[in-house]
Amino acid sequence: MPYPARLRAAALTASAVTLSALMAGCGGGTQDSDENLPEQKLSWKDCPAPSEAEGGGAAPSPLPDGQEWQCATMKAPLDYDDPEGDTIDLALIRAESSGAADQRIGSLIFNFGGPGGSGVTTLPAFGQDYAKLNTRYDLVSFDPRGVGRSAPVECLDNKQLDAYFQQDATPDDAAERTELVDNTERFNAACEKNSKKVLPHVPTTDAARDMDLMRQVLGDDKLYYFGISYGTELGGVYAHLFPKKVGRAVFDAVVDPTQTPEQGSLGQAKGFQLALDNFAEDCVSKVEDCPIGDTADDVKSRIARLLKDLDRKPIPGIFPRQLTETAATGGIAQSLYSKDFWEYLTEGLEQAYDGDGQVLMALSDSLNGRNENGTYSNITAANVAINCADDKPRYDTAYVEGKLPQFRKASPLFGDFLAWSMLSCTDWAVAGAADHPDVSAPGAPPVLVIGNTGDPATPYEGAGRMAEALGKGVGVELTYKGQGHGAYDSKNKCVRDAVDGYLLDGKVPAAGTVCS
Protein backbone atom coordinates (compact mmCIF):
# COMPACT_ATOMS: atom_id res chain seq x y z
CA MET A 1 0.00 0.00 0.00
CA PRO A 2 1.14 3.55 -0.57
CA TYR A 3 0.32 4.35 3.02
CA PRO A 4 0.79 2.45 6.26
CA ALA A 5 -2.09 0.85 8.08
CA ARG A 6 -2.55 3.99 10.11
CA LEU A 7 -1.65 7.58 9.32
CA ARG A 8 0.18 7.83 12.63
CA ALA A 9 2.55 10.49 11.41
CA ALA A 10 5.18 12.10 13.53
CA ALA A 11 4.10 15.09 15.49
CA LEU A 12 4.40 17.52 12.60
CA THR A 13 7.88 18.54 13.44
CA ALA A 14 10.46 17.49 10.89
CA SER A 15 7.63 17.28 8.35
CA ALA A 16 6.77 20.90 8.99
CA VAL A 17 10.36 21.92 8.31
CA THR A 18 10.39 19.95 5.07
CA LEU A 19 7.13 21.53 3.98
CA SER A 20 8.36 25.03 4.75
CA ALA A 21 11.34 24.43 2.48
CA LEU A 22 9.09 23.10 -0.27
CA MET A 23 6.70 26.00 -0.01
CA ALA A 24 9.66 28.41 -0.17
CA GLY A 25 10.65 26.86 -3.35
CA CYS A 26 24.98 8.03 13.93
CA GLY A 27 25.56 3.89 11.66
CA GLY A 28 23.21 1.02 12.06
CA GLY A 29 24.73 -2.29 11.03
CA THR A 30 24.88 -5.30 13.31
CA GLN A 31 28.02 -6.04 15.30
CA ASP A 32 29.17 -8.71 17.70
CA SER A 33 28.42 -7.97 21.34
CA ASP A 34 31.66 -6.99 23.04
CA GLU A 35 30.75 -5.15 26.23
CA ASN A 36 28.43 -4.95 29.19
CA LEU A 37 25.83 -2.80 27.49
CA PRO A 38 24.37 -0.96 30.52
CA GLU A 39 27.90 0.09 31.49
CA GLN A 40 28.90 1.47 28.10
CA LYS A 41 30.14 5.05 27.89
CA LEU A 42 28.71 7.29 25.19
CA SER A 43 31.07 9.42 23.10
CA TRP A 44 29.20 12.71 22.52
CA LYS A 45 30.40 14.70 19.50
CA ASP A 46 29.18 17.45 17.19
CA CYS A 47 26.23 16.19 15.16
CA PRO A 48 26.72 15.32 11.48
CA ALA A 49 24.25 16.28 8.78
CA PRO A 50 21.25 13.93 8.81
CA SER A 51 21.56 10.82 6.69
CA GLU A 52 19.23 10.24 3.76
CA ALA A 53 17.25 7.78 5.87
CA GLU A 54 16.82 10.50 8.52
CA GLY A 55 15.54 12.94 5.90
CA GLY A 56 18.74 14.69 4.80
CA GLY A 57 19.49 18.39 5.17
CA ALA A 58 22.03 20.35 7.17
CA ALA A 59 23.52 19.60 10.57
CA PRO A 60 21.33 20.95 13.40
CA SER A 61 21.66 24.65 14.20
CA PRO A 62 22.53 25.69 17.76
CA LEU A 63 19.78 26.48 20.24
CA PRO A 64 18.86 30.18 20.67
CA ASP A 65 21.24 30.40 23.65
CA GLY A 66 24.10 29.19 21.44
CA GLN A 67 24.27 25.68 22.84
CA GLU A 68 25.37 23.09 20.28
CA TRP A 69 23.62 19.76 19.82
CA GLN A 70 25.66 16.63 20.53
CA CYS A 71 25.25 13.18 18.99
CA ALA A 72 26.33 9.70 20.01
CA THR A 73 25.58 6.05 19.30
CA MET A 74 24.49 3.48 21.86
CA LYS A 75 24.86 -0.24 21.40
CA ALA A 76 21.78 -2.39 21.98
CA PRO A 77 21.11 -6.09 21.44
CA LEU A 78 19.70 -6.90 18.03
CA ASP A 79 17.68 -9.65 19.71
CA TYR A 80 16.75 -9.22 23.38
CA ASP A 81 16.22 -12.98 23.60
CA ASP A 82 19.93 -13.33 22.77
CA PRO A 83 21.52 -10.46 24.71
CA GLU A 84 25.04 -11.84 24.16
CA GLY A 85 24.58 -11.94 20.39
CA ASP A 86 24.81 -9.25 17.73
CA THR A 87 24.30 -5.59 18.59
CA ILE A 88 23.01 -2.61 16.66
CA ASP A 89 23.92 1.07 16.99
CA LEU A 90 21.14 3.45 18.02
CA ALA A 91 21.61 7.12 17.12
CA LEU A 92 21.08 9.62 19.97
CA ILE A 93 21.05 13.41 20.22
CA ARG A 94 21.07 15.70 23.25
CA ALA A 95 21.22 19.27 24.47
CA GLU A 96 22.67 19.43 27.96
CA SER A 97 20.69 21.13 30.71
CA SER A 98 21.02 24.92 30.50
CA GLY A 99 20.32 25.53 34.20
CA ALA A 100 22.31 25.24 37.39
CA ALA A 101 23.86 21.82 37.97
CA ASP A 102 22.17 21.43 41.36
CA GLN A 103 18.75 21.94 39.71
CA ARG A 104 19.23 19.26 37.05
CA ILE A 105 16.71 16.39 37.28
CA GLY A 106 18.09 14.09 34.60
CA SER A 107 17.55 13.32 30.92
CA LEU A 108 14.12 13.91 29.35
CA ILE A 109 13.74 11.43 26.50
CA PHE A 110 11.44 12.33 23.59
CA ASN A 111 9.75 10.17 21.00
CA PHE A 112 7.82 12.21 18.42
CA GLY A 113 5.86 9.46 16.79
CA GLY A 114 5.43 7.77 13.45
CA PRO A 115 6.28 5.06 14.11
CA GLY A 116 9.29 5.74 11.96
CA GLY A 117 10.07 9.37 12.73
CA SER A 118 13.70 10.32 13.38
CA GLY A 119 14.08 11.85 16.82
CA VAL A 120 17.62 12.91 15.94
CA THR A 121 16.29 15.31 13.29
CA THR A 122 13.01 16.22 14.97
CA LEU A 123 14.23 17.33 18.40
CA PRO A 124 16.60 20.05 17.17
CA ALA A 125 14.05 21.25 14.61
CA PHE A 126 11.82 22.35 17.48
CA GLY A 127 14.17 22.29 20.45
CA GLN A 128 13.43 25.93 21.25
CA ASP A 129 9.87 24.91 22.18
CA TYR A 130 11.34 22.95 25.09
CA ALA A 131 13.66 25.69 26.38
CA LYS A 132 11.93 25.82 29.76
CA LEU A 133 12.23 22.06 30.19
CA ASN A 134 15.88 22.33 29.18
CA THR A 135 16.60 24.36 32.33
CA ARG A 136 16.34 21.19 34.43
CA TYR A 137 16.74 18.38 31.91
CA ASP A 138 19.12 17.28 29.23
CA LEU A 139 16.86 17.09 26.17
CA VAL A 140 17.43 13.69 24.54
CA SER A 141 15.95 11.91 21.57
CA PHE A 142 16.90 9.02 19.33
CA ASP A 143 16.22 7.16 16.13
CA PRO A 144 14.36 4.03 17.28
CA ARG A 145 15.55 0.71 15.92
CA GLY A 146 14.67 0.43 12.23
CA VAL A 147 14.63 4.21 11.82
CA GLY A 148 17.11 6.73 10.39
CA ARG A 149 20.65 5.85 11.51
CA SER A 150 19.53 3.05 13.84
CA ALA A 151 19.73 -0.13 11.72
CA PRO A 152 17.25 1.39 9.25
CA VAL A 153 14.70 -0.77 7.49
CA GLU A 154 15.25 -0.49 3.73
CA CYS A 155 12.64 -1.39 1.14
CA LEU A 156 12.26 0.43 -2.21
CA ASP A 157 14.75 2.92 -3.66
CA ASN A 158 13.89 6.55 -4.39
CA LYS A 159 12.79 6.00 -7.98
CA GLN A 160 10.65 3.04 -6.99
CA LEU A 161 9.06 5.05 -4.18
CA ASP A 162 8.09 7.79 -6.62
CA ALA A 163 6.17 5.20 -8.63
CA TYR A 164 4.80 3.58 -5.48
CA PHE A 165 3.24 6.82 -4.25
CA GLN A 166 1.73 7.52 -7.68
CA GLN A 167 -0.40 4.36 -7.67
CA ASP A 168 -4.13 4.36 -7.03
CA ALA A 169 -4.71 3.70 -3.31
CA THR A 170 -8.52 3.58 -3.66
CA PRO A 171 -9.23 0.97 -6.37
CA ASP A 172 -12.55 1.10 -8.18
CA ASP A 173 -12.46 -2.17 -10.13
CA ALA A 174 -10.84 -5.59 -10.21
CA ALA A 175 -7.86 -4.48 -12.29
CA GLU A 176 -7.02 -1.64 -9.91
CA ARG A 177 -7.42 -3.95 -6.90
CA THR A 178 -5.03 -6.45 -8.46
CA GLU A 179 -2.49 -3.71 -9.14
CA LEU A 180 -2.74 -2.47 -5.59
CA VAL A 181 -2.21 -5.95 -4.13
CA ASP A 182 0.71 -6.60 -6.49
CA ASN A 183 2.38 -3.32 -5.52
CA THR A 184 1.92 -4.09 -1.84
CA GLU A 185 3.47 -7.50 -2.29
CA ARG A 186 6.44 -5.96 -4.15
CA PHE A 187 6.97 -3.41 -1.39
CA ASN A 188 6.84 -6.04 1.34
CA ALA A 189 9.10 -8.41 -0.59
CA ALA A 190 11.67 -5.62 -1.02
CA CYS A 191 11.61 -4.99 2.73
CA GLU A 192 12.26 -8.68 3.41
CA LYS A 193 15.04 -8.85 0.81
CA ASN A 194 16.85 -5.71 2.00
CA SER A 195 16.20 -5.88 5.77
CA LYS A 196 15.55 -9.52 6.60
CA LYS A 197 17.83 -9.55 9.65
CA VAL A 198 16.25 -6.47 11.22
CA LEU A 199 12.51 -7.00 10.55
CA PRO A 200 11.86 -9.44 13.43
CA HIS A 201 13.46 -7.04 15.91
CA VAL A 202 11.63 -3.72 15.44
CA PRO A 203 8.44 -4.13 17.52
CA THR A 204 7.55 -1.52 20.10
CA THR A 205 8.43 -3.87 22.96
CA ASP A 206 12.05 -3.91 21.74
CA ALA A 207 12.10 -0.12 21.40
CA ALA A 208 10.82 0.11 24.99
CA ARG A 209 13.67 -2.14 26.15
CA ASP A 210 16.05 0.14 24.25
CA MET A 211 14.72 3.08 26.25
CA ASP A 212 15.36 1.29 29.52
CA LEU A 213 18.90 0.53 28.40
CA MET A 214 19.21 4.20 27.40
CA ARG A 215 18.03 5.26 30.86
CA GLN A 216 20.78 3.22 32.44
CA VAL A 217 23.50 4.38 30.05
CA LEU A 218 22.48 8.02 30.59
CA GLY A 219 22.84 7.47 34.34
CA ASP A 220 19.21 7.95 35.43
CA ASP A 221 17.50 5.87 38.11
CA LYS A 222 14.11 6.66 36.54
CA LEU A 223 12.90 7.32 32.98
CA TYR A 224 11.72 10.88 32.38
CA TYR A 225 9.75 10.81 29.16
CA PHE A 226 7.76 12.94 26.72
CA GLY A 227 5.90 10.86 24.13
CA ILE A 228 3.89 12.30 21.26
CA SER A 229 1.55 10.39 18.92
CA TYR A 230 2.97 6.85 18.51
CA GLY A 231 5.40 7.91 21.24
CA THR A 232 2.49 7.55 23.69
CA GLU A 233 2.10 3.89 22.72
CA LEU A 234 5.82 3.39 23.16
CA GLY A 235 5.62 5.09 26.55
CA GLY A 236 2.65 2.97 27.57
CA VAL A 237 4.47 -0.22 26.63
CA TYR A 238 7.51 0.96 28.60
CA ALA A 239 5.33 1.65 31.65
CA HIS A 240 3.86 -1.85 31.37
CA LEU A 241 7.28 -3.50 31.15
CA PHE A 242 9.05 -1.30 33.70
CA PRO A 243 6.42 0.34 35.95
CA LYS A 244 8.87 0.89 38.83
CA LYS A 245 11.32 2.67 36.54
CA VAL A 246 8.90 5.38 35.36
CA GLY A 247 9.78 8.82 36.67
CA ARG A 248 7.66 11.65 35.27
CA ALA A 249 6.00 10.94 31.92
CA VAL A 250 3.78 12.94 29.58
CA PHE A 251 1.74 11.43 26.74
CA ASP A 252 0.46 13.95 24.16
CA ALA A 253 -1.68 13.14 21.05
CA VAL A 254 -2.53 9.77 22.51
CA VAL A 255 -2.86 6.51 20.60
CA ASP A 256 -5.83 4.42 21.74
CA PRO A 257 -4.19 1.25 23.12
CA THR A 258 -7.45 -0.72 23.16
CA GLN A 259 -8.02 -0.77 19.41
CA THR A 260 -7.17 -3.28 16.72
CA PRO A 261 -5.58 -1.92 13.51
CA GLU A 262 -9.02 -1.93 11.87
CA GLN A 263 -10.55 0.04 14.72
CA GLY A 264 -7.61 2.44 14.66
CA SER A 265 -8.03 3.06 10.93
CA LEU A 266 -11.77 3.58 11.33
CA GLY A 267 -11.13 5.98 14.19
CA GLN A 268 -8.74 7.92 12.00
CA ALA A 269 -11.34 8.11 9.23
CA LYS A 270 -13.67 9.80 11.72
CA GLY A 271 -10.87 11.99 13.08
CA PHE A 272 -9.70 13.28 9.71
CA GLN A 273 -13.31 13.88 8.65
CA LEU A 274 -13.85 15.93 11.81
CA ALA A 275 -10.71 17.92 11.09
CA LEU A 276 -11.87 18.53 7.51
CA ASP A 277 -15.26 19.67 8.81
CA ASN A 278 -13.52 22.08 11.18
CA PHE A 279 -11.28 23.38 8.38
CA ALA A 280 -14.28 24.03 6.13
CA GLU A 281 -16.23 25.78 8.90
CA ASP A 282 -13.20 27.93 9.72
CA CYS A 283 -12.74 28.99 6.10
CA VAL A 284 -16.32 30.15 5.57
CA SER A 285 -16.49 31.84 9.00
CA LYS A 286 -13.74 34.35 8.21
CA VAL A 287 -14.56 38.00 7.55
CA GLU A 288 -13.23 37.78 3.99
CA ASP A 289 -14.80 35.41 1.50
CA CYS A 290 -13.63 31.79 1.62
CA PRO A 291 -11.93 31.30 -1.76
CA ILE A 292 -12.75 27.58 -1.96
CA GLY A 293 -16.48 27.52 -1.21
CA ASP A 294 -19.49 29.52 -0.09
CA THR A 295 -20.53 27.17 2.73
CA ALA A 296 -18.80 24.39 4.64
CA ASP A 297 -20.74 21.78 2.67
CA ASP A 298 -19.76 23.54 -0.56
CA VAL A 299 -16.08 23.42 0.44
CA LYS A 300 -16.26 19.66 1.07
CA SER A 301 -18.32 18.98 -2.07
CA ARG A 302 -15.77 20.78 -4.24
CA ILE A 303 -12.93 18.78 -2.65
CA ALA A 304 -14.81 15.54 -3.33
CA ARG A 305 -15.34 16.54 -6.97
CA LEU A 306 -11.66 17.41 -7.31
CA LEU A 307 -10.62 13.97 -6.08
CA LYS A 308 -13.01 12.25 -8.48
CA ASP A 309 -11.66 14.33 -11.35
CA LEU A 310 -8.09 13.46 -10.36
CA ASP A 311 -8.98 9.78 -10.27
CA ARG A 312 -9.96 10.08 -13.92
CA LYS A 313 -7.27 12.52 -15.01
CA PRO A 314 -4.36 13.72 -12.85
CA ILE A 315 -3.05 17.27 -13.21
CA PRO A 316 0.55 18.53 -13.26
CA GLY A 317 2.15 18.39 -9.83
CA ILE A 318 5.84 18.91 -9.12
CA PHE A 319 7.53 18.15 -12.44
CA PRO A 320 7.70 15.52 -13.78
CA ARG A 321 5.16 13.92 -11.43
CA GLN A 322 1.39 14.23 -11.68
CA LEU A 323 -0.99 15.03 -8.84
CA THR A 324 -3.14 11.93 -8.58
CA GLU A 325 -6.19 11.33 -6.42
CA THR A 326 -3.94 9.44 -3.98
CA ALA A 327 -1.35 12.21 -3.76
CA ALA A 328 -4.04 14.87 -3.30
CA THR A 329 -5.73 12.87 -0.53
CA GLY A 330 -2.39 12.47 1.22
CA GLY A 331 -1.69 16.18 0.87
CA ILE A 332 -5.07 17.08 2.34
CA ALA A 333 -4.48 14.66 5.24
CA GLN A 334 -1.05 16.16 5.94
CA SER A 335 -2.49 19.67 6.10
CA LEU A 336 -5.00 18.61 8.74
CA TYR A 337 -2.31 17.63 11.26
CA SER A 338 -1.90 21.28 12.23
CA LYS A 339 -4.09 24.35 12.03
CA ASP A 340 -0.95 26.19 10.92
CA PHE A 341 -1.17 24.19 7.68
CA TRP A 342 -4.76 25.17 6.85
CA GLU A 343 -3.60 28.19 4.84
CA TYR A 344 -1.48 25.84 2.70
CA LEU A 345 -4.49 23.61 2.13
CA THR A 346 -6.60 26.58 1.04
CA GLU A 347 -3.84 27.71 -1.33
CA GLY A 348 -3.33 24.19 -2.63
CA LEU A 349 -7.01 23.68 -3.35
CA GLU A 350 -7.29 27.05 -5.11
CA GLN A 351 -4.39 26.13 -7.36
CA ALA A 352 -5.63 22.60 -7.99
CA TYR A 353 -9.02 23.94 -9.14
CA ASP A 354 -7.02 25.93 -11.71
CA GLY A 355 -5.08 22.85 -12.83
CA ASP A 356 -1.91 23.34 -10.75
CA GLY A 357 -1.13 20.56 -8.25
CA GLN A 358 2.21 21.77 -6.88
CA VAL A 359 1.14 22.79 -3.37
CA LEU A 360 -0.95 19.67 -2.70
CA MET A 361 1.92 17.54 -3.98
CA ALA A 362 4.35 19.37 -1.68
CA LEU A 363 2.05 18.52 1.22
CA SER A 364 1.88 14.90 0.07
CA ASP A 365 5.66 14.74 -0.24
CA SER A 366 5.96 16.03 3.31
CA LEU A 367 3.71 13.22 4.53
CA ASN A 368 5.77 10.63 2.65
CA GLY A 369 9.20 11.90 3.73
CA ARG A 370 10.25 13.05 0.23
CA ASN A 371 12.78 15.86 -0.16
CA GLU A 372 13.00 18.36 -3.00
CA ASN A 373 16.02 16.52 -4.38
CA GLY A 374 13.96 13.35 -4.86
CA THR A 375 15.35 11.38 -1.92
CA TYR A 376 13.14 9.82 0.74
CA SER A 377 13.67 9.27 4.43
CA ASN A 378 12.91 5.72 5.55
CA ILE A 379 9.79 6.76 7.50
CA THR A 380 7.45 4.73 5.26
CA ALA A 381 9.58 1.59 5.41
CA ALA A 382 10.03 1.89 9.17
CA ASN A 383 6.38 2.73 9.74
CA VAL A 384 5.16 -0.37 7.93
CA ALA A 385 7.81 -2.59 9.53
CA ILE A 386 7.02 -1.48 13.09
CA ASN A 387 3.24 -1.55 12.62
CA CYS A 388 3.39 -5.01 11.06
CA ALA A 389 5.66 -6.32 13.82
CA ASP A 390 3.24 -4.98 16.43
CA ASP A 391 -0.13 -5.78 14.88
CA LYS A 392 -1.32 -9.38 14.72
CA PRO A 393 -4.36 -9.02 12.41
CA ARG A 394 -3.90 -9.51 8.67
CA TYR A 395 -6.61 -8.35 6.26
CA ASP A 396 -7.33 -9.35 2.66
CA THR A 397 -9.18 -7.62 -0.18
CA ALA A 398 -12.48 -9.39 0.49
CA TYR A 399 -12.41 -8.25 4.10
CA VAL A 400 -11.64 -4.65 3.14
CA GLU A 401 -14.39 -4.60 0.53
CA GLY A 402 -16.86 -5.75 3.16
CA LYS A 403 -15.82 -2.89 5.44
CA LEU A 404 -15.97 -0.11 2.82
CA PRO A 405 -19.55 0.99 3.65
CA GLN A 406 -18.60 1.46 7.31
CA PHE A 407 -15.49 3.44 6.42
CA ARG A 408 -17.35 5.58 3.88
CA LYS A 409 -19.97 6.40 6.48
CA ALA A 410 -17.20 7.49 8.85
CA SER A 411 -15.63 9.68 6.15
CA PRO A 412 -16.82 10.17 2.58
CA LEU A 413 -13.41 11.61 1.71
CA PHE A 414 -10.91 9.51 3.70
CA GLY A 415 -12.91 6.29 4.17
CA ASP A 416 -11.71 4.35 1.11
CA PHE A 417 -8.17 5.63 1.58
CA LEU A 418 -7.92 4.31 5.15
CA ALA A 419 -9.86 1.10 4.54
CA TRP A 420 -7.59 -0.03 1.71
CA SER A 421 -4.52 0.90 3.73
CA MET A 422 -5.31 -2.07 5.99
CA LEU A 423 -3.69 -4.32 3.35
CA SER A 424 -0.21 -3.08 4.29
CA CYS A 425 0.69 -6.09 6.44
CA THR A 426 -1.16 -8.80 4.51
CA ASP A 427 1.91 -10.64 3.21
CA TRP A 428 4.43 -9.34 5.72
CA ALA A 429 7.37 -11.65 6.45
CA VAL A 430 7.11 -11.37 10.26
CA ALA A 431 4.10 -12.29 12.36
CA GLY A 432 2.52 -9.49 14.39
CA ALA A 433 2.67 -9.56 18.17
CA ALA A 434 -0.87 -8.78 19.38
CA ASP A 435 -4.26 -7.29 18.56
CA HIS A 436 -3.30 -4.21 20.56
CA PRO A 437 -0.54 -3.22 23.01
CA ASP A 438 -0.68 -3.94 26.73
CA VAL A 439 -0.09 -0.70 28.65
CA SER A 440 -1.35 -1.68 32.07
CA ALA A 441 1.15 -0.33 34.58
CA PRO A 442 0.18 -1.10 38.17
CA GLY A 443 2.59 0.50 40.58
CA ALA A 444 3.75 3.20 38.20
CA PRO A 445 3.62 6.87 39.28
CA PRO A 446 1.16 9.29 37.65
CA VAL A 447 1.40 9.65 33.87
CA LEU A 448 -0.06 12.85 32.39
CA VAL A 449 -2.24 11.92 29.39
CA ILE A 450 -3.34 14.79 27.11
CA GLY A 451 -6.15 14.48 24.57
CA ASN A 452 -6.96 17.10 21.93
CA THR A 453 -10.64 17.28 20.93
CA GLY A 454 -9.77 18.21 17.33
CA ASP A 455 -6.96 15.70 16.76
CA PRO A 456 -7.36 13.92 13.39
CA ALA A 457 -4.66 11.25 13.68
CA THR A 458 -5.12 10.17 17.30
CA PRO A 459 -8.76 10.99 18.07
CA TYR A 460 -9.59 12.48 21.46
CA GLU A 461 -11.32 9.38 22.84
CA GLY A 462 -8.02 7.50 22.84
CA ALA A 463 -6.66 9.64 25.68
CA GLY A 464 -9.37 8.53 28.08
CA ARG A 465 -8.87 4.91 27.10
CA MET A 466 -5.12 5.19 27.59
CA ALA A 467 -5.59 6.74 31.03
CA GLU A 468 -7.98 3.94 31.98
CA ALA A 469 -5.75 1.21 30.55
CA LEU A 470 -2.68 2.48 32.44
CA GLY A 471 -4.61 1.82 35.61
CA LYS A 472 -6.18 3.55 38.57
CA GLY A 473 -3.92 6.18 40.04
CA VAL A 474 -1.57 6.05 37.03
CA GLY A 475 -3.28 7.70 34.04
CA VAL A 476 -4.24 11.35 34.70
CA GLU A 477 -6.21 12.80 31.79
CA LEU A 478 -6.10 16.44 30.68
CA THR A 479 -8.30 17.69 27.83
CA TYR A 480 -7.28 20.38 25.34
CA LYS A 481 -10.11 21.88 23.30
CA GLY A 482 -8.17 22.68 20.16
CA GLN A 483 -7.26 21.69 16.61
CA GLY A 484 -4.40 19.67 15.20
CA HIS A 485 -2.27 16.73 16.21
CA GLY A 486 -1.06 17.28 19.76
CA ALA A 487 -1.47 19.94 22.42
CA TYR A 488 1.87 21.07 23.88
CA ASP A 489 3.18 22.44 20.60
CA SER A 490 -0.03 24.41 20.11
CA LYS A 491 1.60 26.76 22.64
CA ASN A 492 -1.64 26.90 24.64
CA LYS A 493 -0.64 28.44 27.99
CA CYS A 494 -2.88 26.21 30.08
CA VAL A 495 -1.41 23.05 28.52
CA ARG A 496 2.15 24.37 28.75
CA ASP A 497 1.76 25.32 32.41
CA ALA A 498 0.33 21.90 33.28
CA VAL A 499 3.07 19.95 31.47
CA ASP A 500 5.92 22.17 32.66
CA GLY A 501 4.61 22.16 36.23
CA TYR A 502 4.52 18.37 36.23
CA LEU A 503 7.85 17.68 34.53
CA LEU A 504 9.77 20.43 36.32
CA ASP A 505 8.19 20.44 39.78
CA GLY A 506 6.21 17.20 40.03
CA LYS A 507 2.85 18.99 40.30
CA VAL A 508 0.23 16.58 38.96
CA PRO A 509 -2.78 18.40 37.45
CA ALA A 510 -6.20 17.42 38.72
CA ALA A 511 -7.68 14.58 36.70
CA GLY A 512 -10.23 15.97 34.25
CA THR A 513 -8.53 19.35 33.85
CA VAL A 514 -9.75 21.13 30.69
CA CYS A 515 -7.71 23.67 28.70
CA SER A 516 -9.19 25.71 25.87
Image (tube, rainbow, N blue to C red):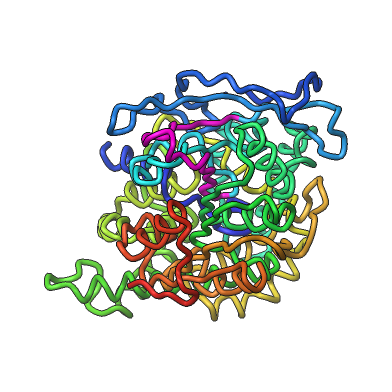
Q: Is residue 30 above or below residue 80?
A: above
- Residue 97 is a magenta residue: yes
User: Percent x, y for residue 34?
Assistant: 80, 19
Q: Is residue 222 above or below residue 63?
A: below
User: Percent x, y for residue 344?
Assistant: 29, 54
The answer to which quarter of the image holds residue 235 is: bottom right
Q: Nearer the viewer, residue 71 or 454?
A: 71
- Residue 20 is a magenta residue: no
Q: Nearer the viewer, residue 13 or 406?
A: 13
Residue 480 visible at all = yes
Is 289 left, or right, of 504 in this rendering?
A: left
Q: Looking at the rendering, in which quadrant would you find the C terminus?
A: bottom left
The total of numbered circles placed on residues is: 0
Farthest-out residue, front: 102
The answer to which quarter of the image holds residue 309 is: bottom left
Numbered range of the magenta stretch? 91-114
User: Percent x, y for residue 505?
Assistant: 44, 54
User: Percent x, y for residue 451?
Assistant: 48, 68
Is 514 left, or right, of 285 in this rendering?
A: right
Residue 155 visible at all = no
Residue located at (74% from left, 58% from top): 391
Q: Is residue 206 above or below residue 237?
A: above
Q: Nearer the viewer, residue 483 or 224?
A: 224
